[in-house]
C-alpha cells in the first residue's frame, strides 16, 4: 500500500525525485562542452544534465593565471546564462587545462606557493565574473612524486581559497572538481588521496581511451566497463579509487560520446583484439557518435553489443569501430547506481547524435527510484 502510494507520487510529481537526494551531495549527471567542437552552446539540451562543464580555460605559464582565449570569451562568458535558459537549475563549472594543454605548465605553477596563489585567485575571479558555479581541474597528468605532492598542496589551498571567498562575500561556495586518470595511480604513481578526499567535491574518473589506433595495434573496447585479467576497465578504475580511500559517493564515472576506428588486417577477423594496420576514417581514428551512426547507416555496418565487456562495436569491410552505444550507456548508468557512485559524465556533448546518448543516460538514471523501491 505504502509502496503503491509512493510509486504513484513518484510518477505524479517528478520534483520529489530532487527532494529524495537533498539529504546528501547532489548527484551529477554531467556533460562537458568543448569549445573545439564548434557545437553551439544554445544547442545543448541542458534539461538532460545537472552539471555542465565548459572546456577549456587555459593556464598562462608566464603569469600562472587562468585565462580564456579571446576567441572563446563570448561563448564562455555567456555559457551559464545560455544553458540556464532551458534549465534554470543546471550548474556550470569552468574546466581548466585538458588533454591538449601542457602538463609542464601545471607542474611549474603547482611547485611554488606564490604561483599556486596566482592560479587560485585568478580562477575564482574568472568563475565569478563569468557566473560559473564551480571550477574543474584537468591536468593531464602529474607525472612525478613531487608533482603529485604539489597537486595535493594546490587542492588544499584551492579549497581554503574557495571557503574564504564564500565566507568573505557571503556567496555560496564555488564547486571544485577534477578530471583524473582512470585509476587512483597514474602508472604506479599514487594520486594525493587525502587532499583529493578533503578538498574536491567529487572526481570525474576518465574511464575511456583504453584502446585506440594510436597506441594499440589490435581492436579493443575503448571504454570497457569490464576487461577481465587487465587493469584497463572502468570497474577496475572505480575499485582502485575506492580501495585507495575515496568514498564511492565522490566518484563520477566518465564515458565517451566518441569511439575509435581501426583498419582490420583481415575483414573476417572482426572481434575484440583483432589485428589491425592502423587508424580508419580520421587520422587518429577518433570518431564522434554522430559520425559513427552515419557510418553505420551509409555502410550497412554490422552492429554488436558485448554485455560482458560493456562495449559496442561495428564493422563494414575492413573498417572496425569500438564505441559506447545506448546499451553500453544504460549498463554504465546502472553500474553507477548499483555501486552508490555520485553520478556520471560524458565527454563531450557536441559528439552526441542529436542528444540520443544524453537522453539515454538521463532516462536510465531516472529509473533509479523505481528500482530502489
Ligand atoms: C579571501 O577572500 C577575499 C575575497 O575574495 C580576498 O580578497 C582575500 O584575498 C582572500 N584571502 C585569502 C587569504 O585568500
Ligand atoms: C603489436 O604491438 C605489440 C605490443 O606493442 C607488439 O609486440 C607486436 O609485435 C605488434 N604487432 C604488430 C603486427 O605490429
Ligand atoms: C565479449 O568479449 C569478450 C572479450 O573479448 C569475449 O571473451 C566474449 O566471448 C565476448 N562475448 C560475446 C557474447 O561475444
Ligand atoms: C532530434 O531529437 C528530437 C527530440 O527527440 C526529435 O524531435 C527530432 O526529430 C530529432 N531530429 C533529427 C534530425 O533526428
Image (tube, rainbow, N blue to C red):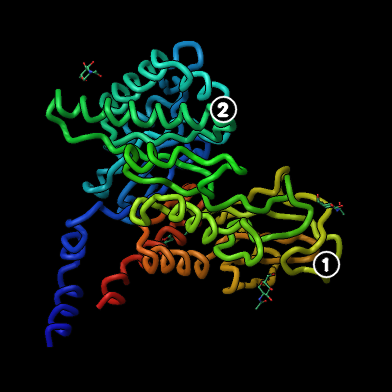
231 or 263: nearer the viewer: 231
**Residue under the image location 57 percent in, 52 percent down:** 208
Residue drawn 25% across and 49% down?
87
- Quarter assignment of residue 163: top left
Which quadrant is the N terminus positioned in?
bottom left
Q: Which residue reaches farthest bottom?
A: 1
User: x%, y% of residue 230?
Assistant: 65, 60
Find residue 140 and report its horizontal and vertical position in percent. 55, 35
The image quadrant in which ligand 3 is located: bottom right
Please name the residue shown 74% across and 51% down the image. Answer: 216
Q: CA distance from mark 2 to mark 1?
A: 39 Å
The answer to whether 199 appears left or right of 65 in the picture is left
Mark 2 against mark 1, which lies toward the viewer?
2
Query: Mark 1 highlights which residue?
Result: 267
**What residue is disc 2 on?**
103
Q: Give coordinates of residue 142: x percent, y percent.
A: 54, 32
Viewer-nearest residue: 118 or 55: 118
| SS state under label 1 | loop
Amino acid at each position: 500500500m505504502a509502496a503503491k502510494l509512493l510509486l504513484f507520487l513518484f510518477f505524479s510529481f517528478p520534483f520529489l525525485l530532487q527532494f529524495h537526494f537533498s539529504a546528501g551531495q547532489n548527484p551529477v549527471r554531467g556533460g562537458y562542452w568543448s569549445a573545439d567542437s564548434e557545437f553551439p552552446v544554445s544547442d545543448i539540451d541542458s534539461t538532460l544534465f545537472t552539471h555542465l562543464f565548459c572546456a577549456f580555460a587555459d593556464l598562462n605559464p608566464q603569469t600562472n593565471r587562468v585565462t580564456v582565449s579571446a576567441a572563446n570569451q563570448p561563448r564562455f562568458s555567456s555559457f551559464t546564462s545560455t544553458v540556464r535558459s532551458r534549465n534554470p537549475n543546471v550548474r556550470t563549472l569552468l574546466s581548466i587545462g585538458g588533454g591538449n594543454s601542457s602538463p609542464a605548465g601545471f607542474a611549474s605553477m603547482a611547485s611554488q606557493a606564490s604561483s599556486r596563489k596566482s592560479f587560485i585567485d585568478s580562477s575564482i575571479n574568472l568563475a565569478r565574473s563569468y557566473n560559473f558555479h564551480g571550477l574543474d581541474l584537468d591536468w593531464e597528468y602529474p607525472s612525478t612524486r613531487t608533482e603529485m605532492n604539489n597537486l595535493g598542496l594546490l587542492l588544499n589551498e584551492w579549497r581554503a581559497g574557495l571557503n574564504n571567498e564564500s565566507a568573505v562575500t557571503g556567496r555560496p561556495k564555488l564547486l571544485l572538481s577534477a578530471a583524473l586518470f582512470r585509476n587512483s595511480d597514474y602508472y604506479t604513481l599514487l594520486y594525493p588521496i587525502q587532499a583529493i578526499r578533503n578538498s574536491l567535491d567529487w572526481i570525474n574518473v576518465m574511464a575511456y581511451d583504453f584502446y585506440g589506433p594510436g597506441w594499440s595495434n589490435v581492436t579493443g573496447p575503448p571504454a570497457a566497463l569490464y576487461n577481465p585479467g587487465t587493469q584497463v576497465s572502468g570497474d577496475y578504475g572505480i575499485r582502485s579509487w575506492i580501495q585507495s580511500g575515496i568514498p564511492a559517493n565522490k566518484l563520477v564515472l566518465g564515458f565517451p560520446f566518441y569511439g575509435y576506428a581501426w583498419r582490420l588486417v583481415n575483414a573476417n577477423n572482426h572481434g575484440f583484439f583483432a589485428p589491425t594496420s592502423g587508424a580508419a576514417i580520421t587520422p587518429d581514428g577518433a570518431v564522434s557518435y554522430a559520425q559513427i551512426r552515419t557510418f553505420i547507416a551509409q555502410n550497412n555496418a554490422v552492429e554488436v553489443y558485448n554485455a560482458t565487456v560493456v562495449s559496442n562495436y561495428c564493422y563494414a569491410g575492413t573498417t572496425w569501430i569500438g564505441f559506447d552505444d545506448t546499451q553500453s550507456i544504460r549498463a554504465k548508468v546502472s553500474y553507477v547506481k548499483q555501486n552508490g557512485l555520485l553520478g556520471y559524465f560524458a565527454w563531450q556533448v557536441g559528439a552526441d547524435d542529436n542528444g540520443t546518448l544524453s537522453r539515454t543516460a538521463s532516462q536510465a538514471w531516472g529509473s533509479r527510484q523505481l528500482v530502489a523501491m
